[in-house]
Image: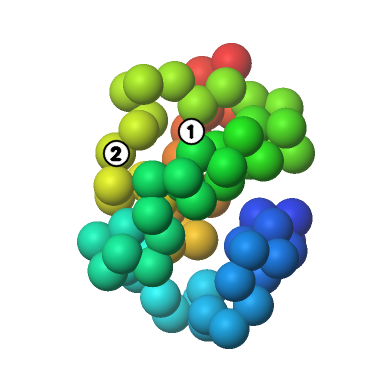
Amino acid sequence: MEQLLELLNDINPDLDYDTVDNLIDGRVYDSLSILNLIDEIEDIFDIEIGPKWMRNENFNSAAAMWNMICQIREED
């Protein structure tokens, strides 16, 4: 989770990723930001985020992203 938080803080250090839960729904991140974020997550965690994971709820918060990463790892 620490690596994910570092990545998110590099993108936007002004957000409190422990509490924010509307990164997509609140339009904090746009579609280009999410595509870049997905690329970074895939590289850092050596996973592939397939179409079934491309849902707003998986990217609305750091906790949701971490949960998604863990689930993808479990499937591999």
The front one of 47 and 7 is 7
The front one of 61 and 76 is 61
* Amino acid at circle 1: Gln
**Which residue does the numbered mark 2 point to in the structure image?**
55
* Amino acid at circle 2: Arg
Please provide percent x and percent y for residue 37: 57, 46
Q: Give the farthest residue toward the left.
A: 25
Which quadrant is the C terminus positioned in?
top right
**Which residue does the numbered mark 1 point to in the structure image?**
71
Which quadrant is the N terminus positioned in?
bottom right
Mark 1 Cα shell of 10 Å, populated few (<14), some (14-19), many (≥20): few
Whether residue 74 appears in this view of the structure is no
Whether residue 9 appears in this view of the structure is yes
Q: Left of 33 or right of it: where is 2?
A: right
What residue sits 58% from the left and 83% below the top? Answer: 14
Classify mark 2: helix, strand or loop: loop
Mark 2 Cα shell of 10 Å, populated few (<14), some (14-19), many (≥20): few
Q: Left of 2 or right of it: where is 55?
A: left
